[in-house]
Image (spheres, rainbow, N blue to C red):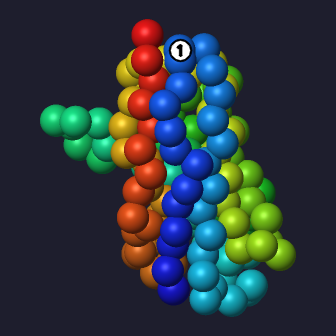
Amino acid sequence: VQLQASGGGLVQAGGSLRLSCVASGMILSVFRTDTLGWYRQAPGKERELVADIRNSGTTNYADSVKGRFTISSDNVKRRVYLQMNSLKPEDTAVYYCRSNFYNSWGQGTLVTVSS
């Protein structure tokens, strides 16, 4: 299984971005029951959980992004999305997607928020 993240870029504070992660090779039964997460790592900081989605429905968010970010998934496309609104400079980081079932990480996509 390979995880491929995309959608990062440069945006001004207050703007929005939508990240996408495709789980290539993951069978539907696993995708539906897996915990799929978005993590981020800012320069000089540890990687942290941003949001995850379980059983294609139950969601969990870091306090710092609650009310601004939304995680969702598409079973047919084997994709997990992270809609990021009201972005702040402190959201600047490399964002990674992760499959808990396979303990597998995607390659990361850089999000830069300018003030």
Identify the residue shown where x is 29% and y is 36%. 42
How many circles with numbers are drawn on the protein? Answer: 1
Identify the residue shown where x is 58% and y is 49%. 7
Among the 4 quarters of the image, the one containing residue 70: top right
Q: Can you give x and y, in whole percent of width and height, for residue 68 in the image?
A: 65, 25
Q: Is residue 42 above or below residue 94?
A: above
Quadrant housing the C terminus = top left
Q: Is residue 83 above or below residue 101?
A: above
Answer yes or no: is residue 111 visible: yes
Identify the residue shown where x is 68% and y is 89%. 27
Q: Can you give x and y, in whole percent of width and height, for residue 11 in the image?
A: 53, 25
Query: How would you rate the neighbour count of disc 1 (Cα within 10 Å): few for under 14, some for 14-19, many for 20 or more?
Result: some
Q: Tell which residue pokes out farthest to the front in this image.
A: 10
Looking at the picture, tell me which residue is in the foreground, 78 or 29.
Answer: 78
Looking at the picture, tell me which residue is in the foreground, 88 or 68.
Answer: 88
Residue wearing tag 1: 13
Identify the residue shown where x is 73% and y is 86%. 29
Q: Can you give x and y, in whole percent of width and height, for residue 5 in the image?
A: 52, 60
